Amino acid sequence: MLVNTPPMGWNSWNTFGAKISDKLIREIADQFIKLGLDKAGYRYIVIDDCWSELERDPETGKMLASKEKFPDGMRALADYIHAKGLKFGMYSCAGVKTCANYPGSFDHEFLDAETFAEFGCDFLKYDFCHKPAHASGPLLYRRMGNALRASGRDILYSICNWGSDDIWSWARSAGAHMYRSTGDICDNFKSFTDIAQSQFEKFCFSAPQCFNDMDMLTVGMFGQGNVAAGGNDLTQYKNHFALWCIMGTPLMLGSDIRNITPEILTLITNQELIAINQDPEARPAFFAAYPPHLKGKCVVLAKMLSNGDYAIGYFNLTSEVHATTLYFDDMGFPFASGYDLAFRDVISGEDLGLKRESLIQRLEPHDCRVFRVTPVKRH
Ligand code: GLA
């Protein structure tokens, strides 16, 4: 399976937790099409934890879909999702139980991978709770990596071990297409900024086929749902989405998209932001400005794009107004290069025109600005 750009989709956990059902997932699929999320690039609809019965089938040993939540079974649901041109994702765990105490795949990896293939599953999120102490985490993830490949179906493998065991050093070799590098996100400013800050410098291992996953987005939750913890406002969600885009991490929505506001829909379908995330070269962002006294809370991130442009994001993660200067020399464009830089704000659409040597941006607390920047040779 080829996964050339960060996967995009929706996952049930952030908003719904255990409150999932066939009806809900079908409504989400309908909503994908109604809102045009598919056209914006979102493809995977992933059911997280709590989808199964508490016991395996006593005869076959297979996992069983909850009769109450999914009375028609998983295959029918997968067919419904596929008929809309979307992809279907599911969840299991490398331990004996999932994090919410449903059966895990420990020692059942190959049988479960076959079951997921029979369900018509295209994506497996594979968690890390209840792992027997004697078992090696990396080995268990390799087992499931092998099992998925042996299943005969193309299944995107999403490892979720929260960054333990130096995940970045072996996830790719275990067959993963994305690997969770942090603990669970919750819906407030501190949570997503802590996560982003912890990964600013860890993206050198993230590349086509295997992407660093900073967790599902909380954008648009506004303090409602399973991981609600105070919520964010629109400015903060803009910051959250922009960080995920420029850092090149998977874009898995986590809000109840059946009740989305127009502003959030505009944000998550912003084609210029998504193009930065989905750039085919998938180069990591680097610090173009890092005022040391602000310890990574006010930064300018820059990312080379495949057509010769750059994405440049100014991020204010503090609760005060800050002005940050980007000196073009710090991203390898000294005055002597003979190039000026043309700035276009991809969120507001404002064209700032050509800038020479530096650009200062004054940002309100928690605000950000993201530009698409084109080097232009001076006459
Ligand atoms: C862990 C994962 C979460 C979610 C829950 C489900 O905490 O990190 O993303 O899948 O388990 O129980």
Image: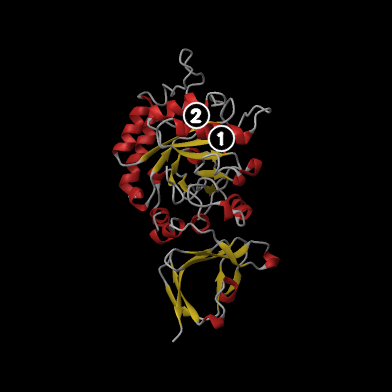
Q: Nearer the viewer, residue 324 or 24?
A: 324
Q: Residue at x 34, y 37 (%)?
A: 81
Which amino acid, by three-letter code, is at mark 1? Answer: Arg
Quarter of the N terminus within the rendering: top left
- Give the label on residue 206, or none: none
Q: Secondary structure at mark 2?
A: loop
* Mark 1 vs mark 2: in front: 1
Q: Position of residue 324 (x, y in %)?
A: 60, 71
Q: Earlier in the sequence, mark 1 or mark 2?
A: 2
- Residue 193 visible (yes or no): no
Q: Are marks 1 and 2 in contact (CB under 8 Å)?
A: no
> From the viewer's perspective, is 36 left or right of 170?
left
User: Residue at position x 50%, y 82% from top?
Assistant: 338
**Residue placed under numbered mark 1 in the picture:** 142
Q: Given the image, on which type of amino acid does mark 2 rest?
A: Cys
Can you give x and y, in whole percent of width and height, for residue 168 in the image?
60, 47
